[in-house]
Image (cartoon, rainbow, N blue to C red):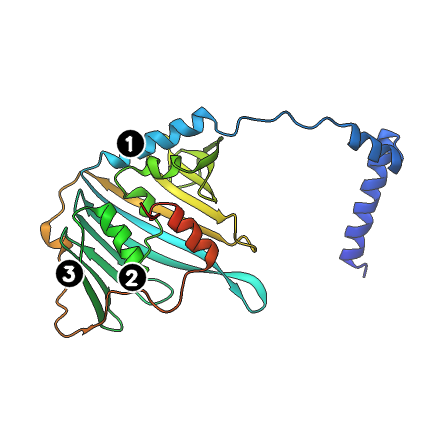
Amino acid sequence: MVNNNFLGRFFLLALGLLLVGACGCTRQELKQTKEEVPAPTAQPQIEQKAVDVLNASSSRLASARTMKFTAVVFYESPSLPGPPLIYTTQSEVALQRPDKLRVITPGDGPASDFYYDGKTMVAYAPAENLVAIAEAPPTIDAALEAAYHNAAIYIPFSDVIVADPYKDIADGLTLAFYIGQSRVVGGTTTDMVAYETHGTFVQIWIGADDKLPRMARAVYRNDPVQLRHGVMFSDWQLNGDIPADVFEWPAVAAAKHIPFARPDMPLPPEVKSAVESGPFRSK
């Protein structure tokens, strides 16, 4: 039996010889031809169409009085064999501006719930029956920042729930370009945009008609192994009525109370740098 790998190598070699013969070029001539090809013309670093798509999505999100959606977050983590493993979480999010937020998050690791009602924020681990409670500032943005700085609680899709999503992008924007449209993400036609801000390179898919995000993928520039982080959005509901009890945390009298404080294990440096230069940077 003839080895398929041998056939594959033979085919590639034959193809290479065919291409060289077809152009009548020696290896040296090919090298010279490559060197003589002019460098591509520099493109604008920030394209207006990309900015327009990002701005339209930001305006739609910022103008919503209430918001509900599902976010499936996936992130890579190094493995002992070498190639990264993917872990996921799923968050059911409910928000009412300016001072109500609930994030219920089961995942591949421990589940966690986060509640905020304008005065108090609560982090609850249902499986371990642990709860941390702290006083909170009067807006969602300030509460998210306080939760991160005081207890290392980071909501990876916080960019879509802050008061002005585009401002956090624009403050550090160094690159933005429009890729085109997709008809396979989120069950709708989306505009694809890539941008870089605060050292994070992001590709995002935004609904062409409703201007709502459907998926985003990010790589931290300072990460030496370029691990990828992403989120998929679905079940968007904007400006609907949300019952007040949605934002009430469960009875925690029997739970073990722990300090609302940062854990011992820090975030990786490249993640910490990108997060703190973005939505949760020091004012």
Among the 4 quarters of the image, the one containing residue 278 = top left
Name the residue type under label 1. Answer: Ser
| Mark 2 element type | helix
Query: How far apart are labels 1 and 3 at the CA level?
Result: 30 Å
Whole-percent x, y for residue 154 in the image: 33, 55
Q: Residue at x 11, y 49 (%)?
A: 243
Whole-percent x, y for residue 114 in the image: 23, 58
Among the 4 quarters of the image, the one containing residue 3 = bottom right
Q: Which of label 1 and label 2 is nearer to you?
A: 2
| Mark 1 element type | helix
Q: Residue furthest left?
A: 244
The residue tagged 1 is 59
Query: How far apart are labels 1 and 2 at the CA level?
Result: 30 Å
Q: Residue furthest front?
A: 283
* 193 left or right, relative to 95: right
Per the rendering, the mark at residue 151 is 2
Whether residues under marks 3 and 2 lie with C-beta atoms below 8 angstroms apart, the answer is no
Label 1 environment density (alpha carbons within 10 Å; few <14, some 14–19, many ≥20): some
Whole-percent x, y for residue 159 in the image: 33, 44
Report how many numbered discs are placed on residues in the image: 3
Whole-percent x, y for residue 271 in the image: 44, 54
Q: Nearer the viewer, residue 283 or 114?
A: 283
Name the residue type under label 2. Answer: Ala
Q: Residue at x 53, y 26 (%)?
A: 44
Per the rendering, the mark at residue 249 is 3
> First in sequence: mark 1 or mark 2?
1
> First in sequence: mark 1 or mark 3?
1
